[in-house]
Image (spheres, rainbow, N blue to C red):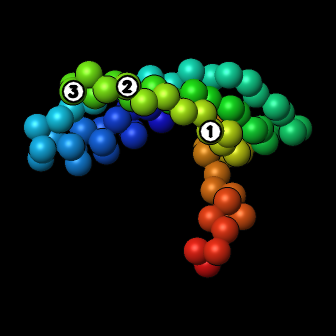
Amino acid sequence: MGDLLSGYANDYWAEQGVTSTMQVREISTVMNGDDRAKVTVEFTTTWSTGQEDTWQETLSMVKTDGTWYITLDWSDLGSLF
C-alpha cells in the first residue's frame, strides 16, 4: 500500500521537483470471520522538502482466494453519489 501511494505521490510531485517516501504501520486489526477485517493503519509521508505528514485510516479488507484486498466502503463517500 505504501509503495503504491508513494509511487503516485512521487509521480505527481516529481514535476515540481519534490519527492516523497511513505511508511505504513499497522495499529490494530479487528477480524470479522476468517475473510473480513477492519485494519487501522498509520501513514507517514516524508517529503524531500523536510515536511512530514502523519495520519490514520481504518481500511476495510476482504480475503479472496487466499489474498487480502482493500475494499471501498461507499458510505465513506457521503454525498458524492
Q: Position of residue 63 (x, y in %)?
A: 70, 41
- Secondary structure category for the residue under label 3: loop
CA gap between label 3 and label 2 equals 9 Å
* Kind of residue indicated by mark 3: Thr
Q: Residue furthest bottom?
A: 81
C-beta proximity under 8 Å, tags 3 and 2: no
Q: Is residue 53 left or right of residue 74?
A: left
The residue under label 3 is 49
Task: For residue 14, say whether it is visible.
Answer: yes
Q: Earlier in the sequence, mark 1 or mark 3?
A: 3
Judging depth in this view, the residue of 34 and 55 nearest the camera is 55
Q: Is mark 1 in CB contact (under 8 Å) with mark 3?
A: no
Q: Position of residue 61 (x, y in %)?
A: 69, 43
User: In the image, what residue type sits under mark 1?
Assistant: Glu
- Are there few (<14), some (14-19), or many (20+) residues within 10 Å of tag 1? few
Badge 1 marks a residue whose secondary structure is strand
Binning the other alpha carbons within 10 Å of mark 2 as few (below 14), some (14 to 19) or many (20 upward) gives few
Residue 79 percent location from the top left of the image: 64, 74
Q: Name the disc covering residue 52, or none.
A: 2
Residue at 73% in and 24% down: 28
**Which mark, by number, is residue 45?**
none
Placement of 37 over or under 78, stated as above or below: above
Question: Going 31% across and 26% down the picture, which residue do you hit?
Answer: 51
Which mark is nearer the camera, 2 or 1? 2
* Residue position for label 1: 57
Q: Return the x and y of residue 62 as percentages of the image width and height.
A: 71, 45
Say which quarter of the image contains residue 78. Answer: bottom right
Three-letter amino acid code at the position of disc 2: Glu
Closest to the observer, 45 or 71: 45
| Residue that lies at the very extreme toward the right in this rendered image | 33
Q: For the residue labelled by badge 2, is the local secondary structure a helix, a strand or a loop?
A: strand
- Residue depicted at 11% across the width and 37% down the height: 17
